[in-house]
Amino acid sequence: MSNILRTKSGSQYAIESGKTVLGIEFGSTRIKAVLIGEDHMPIASGSYDWENRYENSVWTYSLEDIWTGLQESYRKLSKDVSENYGVPLRTIGAIGFSGMMHGYMAFDKDGNLLVPFRTWRNTITGKAAKKLTDLFQFNIPQRWSIAHLYQAILNKEPHVKDISHQTTLAGYVHWKLTGQKVLGVGEASGMFPIDSKTNNYNKRMMKLFNEQLKAKKLPWKLQDILPKVLVAGDAASVLTEEGAKLLDPTGQLKAGIPLCPPEGDAGTGMVATNSVAVRTGNVSAGTSVFAMIVLEKALSKLYPEIDMVTTPTGKPVAMVHSNNCTSDINAWVGLFREFADALGVKTDQSGLFEMLYQKALEGDADGGGLLAYNYFSGEPITHLEEGRPLFVRTPESRFTLSNFMRAHLFSALGTLKIGLDILFEQERVKIDKVLGHGGFFKTKEVGQRIMAAAMNVPVSVMETAGEGGAWGIALLASYMIHKAENEPLEAYLSNKVFAGENGTTIAPDQRDVDGFTAFMERYKKGLVIERTAVDALKK
């Protein structure tokens, strides 16, 4: 983004006249705020690092974490505006919020959180997910909100009878800032299955679920507690006086700013990579990794490894989601950093990452016979309810730094590859392009080459890819207030946002493809090792 030229006076005018748009996304490790100008390009940003906690066998963030992070990321963005443009940030053309999808946030009639926020990372809903998948004949992954709700019902948790409202992280923040209990359709599709013909919750499945509730004698039906579903372009209320003070405790920000429907990180990833049209796909690779493929037609049957969600406009999307991606690599880089510090060698963290990633390109095609599992948490695709990060080798393995890094980069995509093979080999799904974004692609070429080897299709990374979901939700907010009558989101993005966009595309190298295939044969055979580690090393 740094090479995009704009006048300071033009951005200053946009800020003062309220012609900017703000997007804020709650990611797994960072809350990011991005302010864009009239050309849809970022003019200011702010962020706040945070981490989930493992408390009482549950991955969670506290409400205090949420509000501290939101206010701090906004404060830093406001400071960026003030220092670079010499004006305070008092009003904005539109705002959008997005966040990690799925999980469980249940509230009583007074708005109190009934149990600590259970994030997408938890794999504690296996029984509920299986029962609902069988009941609906539609894949319900463990991380989905409805699986969490039903598991709480099966567990006979006392709070269930008191539920008045259930939502997601993005839906919660939007609700507190506007008073409206709504979700964008893409985010809602990770709570409960969506009917793409109506862009609303699937009526047949909702009826089946409510029939399950009758025997439980609960005082509510599912439609009573789920948020209202909206699509991209819909107005989703305005910032209240209370909401403005929650976002900006200094009181500078004015109320009355329109908000777009809150969306999930999958939807904002699609928008940020211009991957909302059929036969397009994107891969988001960071703490978790997921591929989103916009389908031409429905899949022929149910696959437990494939989630069916939607674009922010309701188009069906096949989603392959792996809970684990870069966390184990980050841990190893941290170890190398400690080693360098012990030697008294000063190292830059980003430079260390780049050097180690580049090393992977020098390794043997298959990673030298090395094997790694990056499972910090469980992986439903490989039927593991918990994770144990592992590195395995035989005496004959070629144990070099380059092979070590290559094996770990392969491992980061191993579970994803298992799911993608179903789409490409069994369902014969066709895609014209795949766009990558997230930390896995930060080092030039490396992530792209590894992903191209895994998917065996060209992988593109755009200059804007680093802006991520915060930029994506800002674009959705901009679409809401700037779209022409009957202008589809695909046309708005292609013609007004991404026209002339620069990027790089890397085609799969046959050596890499063959090497990744060999690694995956070893990976699948070795899953018994991971299973044994989970069983033997109990938490």
Image (cartoon, rainbow, N blue to C red):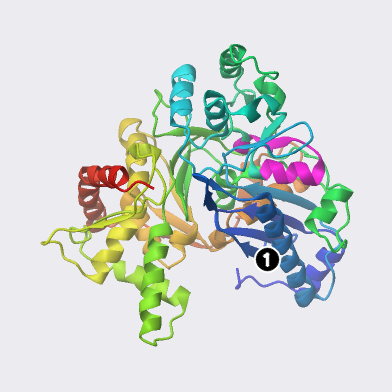
- Based on the picture, tell me whether residue 208 belongs to the magenta stretch: no
The front one of 50 and 443 is 50
- Most distant residue in the left direction: 396
Of 503 and 131, which appears nearest the observer?
131
Where does residue 381 sit, x and y in percent of width and height? 37, 38
Residue 334 visible? The answer is yes
Taking the spot 52% from the left edge, 30% from the top edge, the residue there is 147
The N terminus, quarter of image:
bottom right
Q: Give the residue displayed 54% in from the left and 53% down from the top.
A: 53
Is 262 placed left or right of 330 in the picture? right
Whether residue 229 is situated above or below residue 60 in the rendered picture: above
x and y percentages locating residue 344 in the rendered image: 39, 88
Given residues 264 and 251, the one toward you in this image is 251
| Vertical position of residue 352 compared to residue 484: above or below | below
Density class for disc 1 (Cα within 10 Å; few <14, some 14-19, many ≥20) is many
Total labels drawn: 1
**Which residue type carries mark 1?**
Gly
Residue 465 sits in quarter: bottom right
Indicate the position of residue 407 as horizontal and vertical percent values: 27, 59
Residue 161, image quadrant: top right
Please name the residue that numbered disc 1 is placed on.
46
In this picture, is 222 found above or below 185?
above
Question: Chief secondary structure of the magenta span?
Answer: helix
Residue under the image location 82 percent in, 57 percent down: 92
As displayed, is residue 338 above or below residue 243? below
The reply to whether residue 139 is visible in this rendering is: no
- Secondary structure under badge 1? strand
Q: Residue at x 47, y 44 (%)?
A: 281
Q: Locate residue 515: give its quadrant.
A: bottom left
Residue 516 location (% of width, % of height): 26, 53
Q: Which residues are magenta?
A: 170-187
